[in-house]
Image (cartoon, helix red, strand yellow):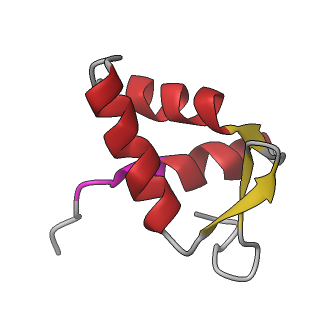
Amino acid sequence: MTQRKKSEADWAVEILVKKQEAMFYADLIQEVAKMMKKKNDPASLTSIYTRINMDNRLVYQGQGYWYYDTNRVRQDA
């Protein structure tokens, strides 16, 4: 079976599961870019933010913080 490439949202969920606390969006986006070896330019960071924002596993907590939906993410992920 072929494993699919991890998406921006997959990386964000993995980071948040490991951290076990909400992260400020700019820090989360920077960490995802680093893990994916993407450029740290506005276009790349905006793309990452958009993909995170569209994924229903990730939930905006207010005041710029994001966390994962514990009902949609397995802890052993």
Residue 67: percent from left, percent from top = 73, 56
Quarter of the figure with residue 4: bottom left
- Look at the image and say whether residue 28 sits in the magenta stretch: no
Residue at x-position 64% and y-position 73%: 73
Quarter of the figure with residue 74: bottom right
Residue at x-position 71% and y-position 59%: 60
Q: What residue occupies the far top of the structure in this picture?
A: 40
Residue 35: percent from left, percent from top = 42, 30
When the figure is inspected, residue 51 is found, relative to residue 33, above or below; the finding is below
**Camera sees residue 43:** yes
Residue 54: percent from left, percent from top = 45, 67
Q: Is residue 23 left or right of residue 49?
A: right
Quarter of the figure with residue 34: top left
Pick the front one: 11 or 2: 11
**Which region of the structure is painted magenta?**
5-11
When the figure is inspected, residue 30 is found, relative to residue 23, above or below; the finding is above
- Look at the image and say whether residue 6 sits in the magenta stretch: yes
**Camera sees residue 36:** no
Q: Is residue 6 left or right of residue 74?
A: left
Residue at x-position 53% and y-position 28%: 31
Residue 50: percent from left, percent from top = 40, 52
Residue at x-position 58% and y-position 63%: 77
When the figure is inspected, residue 7 is found, relative to residue 39, above or below; the finding is below
Quarter of the picture holding the N terminus: bottom left
Q: What residue occupies the far bottom of the structure in this picture?
A: 71
